[in-house]
Image: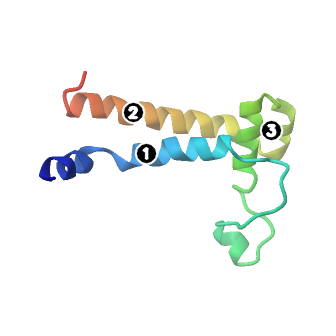
Amino acid sequence: MKEITQRLHRFPLELVFWIGSLLAILMLEPGAEPHLSLCPLDQLGFSWCPGCGLGRSMNLLARGDFQASWSMHPLAMLAYVVIFSRIWQLIKNLKTTHNYG
């Protein structure tokens, strides 16, 4: 049992979060009805938010609908670059830190 807990403490939860977020974005339905929003500006009653539509835009970009993705949020490609670079960095760090490579 002690060995299992030690392995869990060494595993980066941030890596699980980023991979999970990409999977969640890919499973979104961009044309679906409005849903529960976790956006703090939306919760405060503001109708405009700089990040609104980013997840749907990333989903459209993954589906190959570039024009609709750009019109929904122009920073979707940059978001993919940032997320993939962070995942790559975490995997590289995991390999060098735990002597897996």
Residue 101 x, y percent position in the rendering: 25, 21
Q: Quarter of the image holding residue 47?
A: bottom right
Q: Amino acid at mark 2?
A: Gln
- Please report the residue visible at 26 percent of the width from the left and 49 percent of the height from the top: 8
Residue carrying label 3: 69
- Please report the residue visible at 70 percent of the width from the left and 66 percent of the height from the top: 37
Residue carrying label 2: 89
- Please report the residue visible at 13 percent of the width from the left and 52 percent of the height from the top: 2
Q: Secondary structure at mark 1?
A: helix
- Left or right placement of residue 71 versus residue 56 in this view: right
Residue carrying label 1: 16
Nearer the observer, disc 1 or disc 2?
1
Give the farthest residue toward the top. 101
Residue 3 x, y percent position in the rendering: 14, 47
Q: Which of 12/73 is in front? A: 12
Give the farthest residue toward the front. 1
Asked if the residues shown at circle 1 and circle 2 are in contact, with their CB atoms under 8 angstroms apart, the answer is: no
How far apart, in angstroms, are the residues tagged by discs 3 and 1? 26 Å
Q: Quarter of the image holding residue 82?
A: top right
- Left or right placement of residue 44 versus residue 87 in this view: right
Mark sitting earlier along the chain (1/2): 1
Mark sitting earlier along the chain (3/1): 1
Query: Crowding near pointer 1: few (<14 within 10 Å), some, many (20+)?
Result: few
Mark sitting earlier along the chain (3/2): 3
How far apart, in angstroms, are the residues tagged by discs 3 and 2? 26 Å
Q: Amino acid at mark 1?
A: Val
- Please report the residue visible at 83 percent of the width from the left and 54 percent of the height from the top: 32
Query: Crowding near pointer 3: few (<14 within 10 Å), some, many (20+)?
Result: many
